[in-house]
Amino acid sequence: MTARGRGRGGWQQADLPSADDAQAWFTGRLPDGWFTGAPEITCDRDEIVVVGELPALDTEHPDTDAGRADAAAAESGRISRFREETREARIEIARQAETRYRRKVAWGARLGGTTELFTTISVPVMTRLRQPERLVLDTLVDAGVARSRSDALSWSVRLVGRHADEWLAELRSAMARVDDLRAQGPS
């Protein structure tokens, strides 16, 4: 589980309850049979994303371009069916979790090579950039990689996240250790 700890983020997290037990809470709360194992839970200060692996399809598809396209379509269709069949229950579970953790809850499902997220939120982030950083964003827009500076910034963050997973994991681990040490200190 990825979670932002206590004490970081200043005023934005001052009264935000901990989501350290979210993995256990969702694992215990979700109906049996929804997923093949424990769901993957990712938390930040705004949202909890719950993604579970659906049971494999019974149908085999040949290892050809057409077969792979058919497999992807079948996986997407099964995820869509799961979304429709579980809507009311997911809404109720999300309401309970939002009351407990004071964060929005988003859902997703994974099947084979297909992962789809639904009901996710998009949060605006304010930043100030100097001209060299703005020029990078403008180059991405001018090249057609992004539609706007905002889209270019989002694209850049995804690219960095994909290439810096190991470093970000180490950083999160170090931040968790600081949180533990801070909690052991005098109150």
Image (spheres, rainbow, N blue to C red):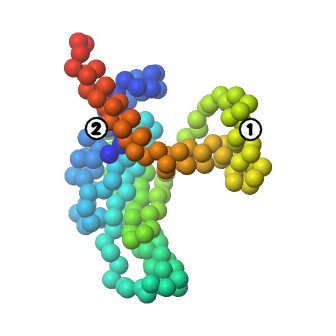
- The spot of residue 146 in percent (x, y) is 69, 51
Displayed quadrant of residue 8: top left
Q: Secondary structure at mark 1?
A: helix
Q: Give the residue number, with chain letter if any, for mark 1.
A: 135
Q: Earlier in the sequence, mark 1 or mark 2?
A: 2
Q: Amino acid at mark 1?
A: Leu
Is residue 126 shown left or right of residue 166? Answer: right
Q: Secondary structure at mark 2?
A: loop
Q: In this view of the protein, which residue sits in the foreground, 158 or 124?
A: 158
* Quarter occupied by the N terminus: top left
Q: Amino acid at mark 2?
A: Asp
Toward the top, the furthest residue is: 186
How packed mark 1 is, by other alpha carbons closer than 10 Å (few <14, some 14-19, many 20 or more), is few
Q: In this view of the protein, which residue sits in the foreground, 12 or 167?
A: 167
* Quarter occupied by the C terminus: top left
Q: Give the residue number, with chain letter if any, for mark 2.
A: 20
The residue drawn where x is 48% and y is 58% is 118
> Residue 98, relative to residue 90: is it above or below?
above
> Residue 58, relative to residue 23: is it above or below?
below
